[in-house]
Image: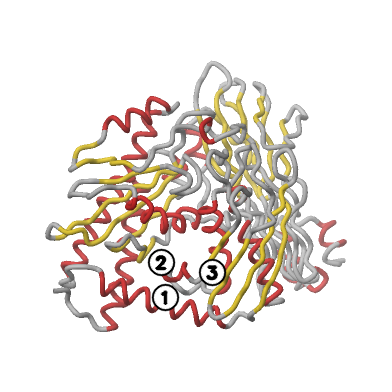
Amino acid sequence: MTATLDIVAQNVVWNRLISVCEEQANALIRAAFGAIVREAGDLSAGVFNAEGDMIAQAVTGTPGHVNTMAASVRAMLKRSGDLRPGDVLVTNDPWLGAGHIFDFVVATPAFLNGTIIGYLASTSHIVDVGGRGWSAEGKSVFEEGVTIPVMLLRRGGELNEDLLSIVTANSRVPHEARGDILSLLISNDTGVTQLLDLMAEYDLTDLSDVSRFIFERSATGSREALMKAPAGTYVNKLTLDGYDAPIELCARMTIGDGHVDVDLAGSTPAVNRGINCPLNYSAAYAAFGIRALLTPDIPNNKASLEAISITAPPGLVVSAERPSPVTARHVIGQALPDLMLGCLEQALPGQVLAESSGALWTLSLSGAGPTEFTSLNVALGGMGARPTVDGLSTTAFPSGVGAVPVEAAEIAAPLIYHSKEYAVDTGGAGTFRGGLAQRIEIGSRLDEDLSLSAAAFERLTAGPAGRAGGRAGAPGRVTISDGTKIKDKGLYTIPAGERLILQTPGGGGFGDPAKRDRDAVDRDLSEGLISHEAAKTLYKRT
């Protein structure tokens, strides 16, 4: 029999479950080989009940990982046989997991007295799994690397070395690829231990009552919060650079009866470049945008996510089907929160932040000369200004990652970061200023050619829009020091002795710039965030 807990104890257990996930995520960060996981936090971790329903997630991580994982664990269980102690499942199938083959999902059953009482799952980015590597040039997912169907990573405590050999044989960095997959295993094992310790402390033999409590409270809280939003149907469109041609994202949002339904019909059809997005990933980020505004205080779990439905006809850039190429799917996915917020601005005028850069610019650099290496980092843009405060600068919103520190990036690869700094005047002017972008300049330490994949460089044509009279943030800009302008998401060579120079987009501003507090303008000037020209022409500061 499971111990009967009072409401206080159930809330304590709920919070302790989140702590279990945090320990799980921290174990993954400590064990990871790849800097993008270890330093930037490109990962997620969660605990699930015996039915495969997510009951808690780590605060550490990204919406694109956690929200997809909420569905992927159930999908993995449907494709697996009976599991026994020591078994662990794995997949990197983009349509079951996190949207592209670089993200591996590992699910580990937790046994108590011979019975599965729950699962611990985690996701992280594996730097290279073959194919074209990090590139939008692939015409199908088959060109993008090795796809691992749902299978056992560990059988009864024994590693599946055949599976690991397939991955490492196809990876340009086999040691790192193997280590990162095993770090997911270690992460889950840590979570299992923490979960069983928690259950023993509270004399629990299963998670059924706790799950029911969490889901009932989350469903009620979500419904009450969503009921406060004006009922109605709201339509919004957003245009992205795309690759060969602009891409249009469309949303029709219906709010009513404590639920939000979004239809992405009308968005551009899937393209033959690797920037398509499977619907599971689109839904993850679209739901995050809605929850960030309307239900921010409700913890993420099965019930809170079920209050929001994201649909789309198959075959669109937001609902790409196999075998569409999907490597840089986050270009589309991370624009979807702004698409949702544009709908919500019509329902809640004056209460919604301006558009953000959505810039998680993947800096994929590799050796194009005698020295072979692969370096993966991210460059971050500005967040949109909020109705009462400036936007955050160089922030990955709506993602949850950071950037690999310069020191770590230079140790891991023969690169020199000649500069990394705020880009002046890039935040959209407004009563509240948009967050600033950053300027980064990188070259080879070996005076050899470098290869660059520009797959994730977006908003080079127009910057994020302002709101309520605020100005747009600055668009992004990428060049090579020899004068070459990077204008699409293709592959480029940076000749020996030259440097890559990039400026990410800034966030949109909120409100009339002329109404900005004079002390705030003076502070921006003194801190070098805006120029004297901007202070004079945009903020009317004489």
Query: Pointer 2: what residue?
Result: 302
Q: Nearer the viewer, mark 3 or mark 2?
A: 2
* Residue drawn at point x = 54 percent, y = 40 percent: 377
Residue farthest along the top direction in this orientation: 370
Disc 1 to disc 3, how far (Cα)?
A: 12 Å
Disc 3 to disc 2, how far (Cα)?
A: 13 Å
Mark closer to the chain start, 1 or 3: 1
Question: For the N terminus, which image quadrant?
Answer: bottom left
Query: Pointer 3: what residue?
Result: 291
Mark closer to the chain start, 3 or 2: 3
The answer to whether 204 appears left or right of 123 in the picture is: left
Total marks placed? 3
Amino acid at the residue labelled 2? Lys
Percent position (x, y) of residue 60?
42, 57
Percent position (x, y) of residue 272?
64, 37
Question: For the C terminus, which image quadrant?
Answer: bottom right
The answer to whether 368 appears left or right of 526 in the picture is: left
Secondary structure type for disc 1: helix
Mark closer to the chain start, 2 or 1: 1
Disc 2: CA contacts within 10 A as few (<14), some (14-19) or many (>=20): many
Query: Pointer 1: what residue?
Result: 218
Amino acid at the residue labelled 1? Ser
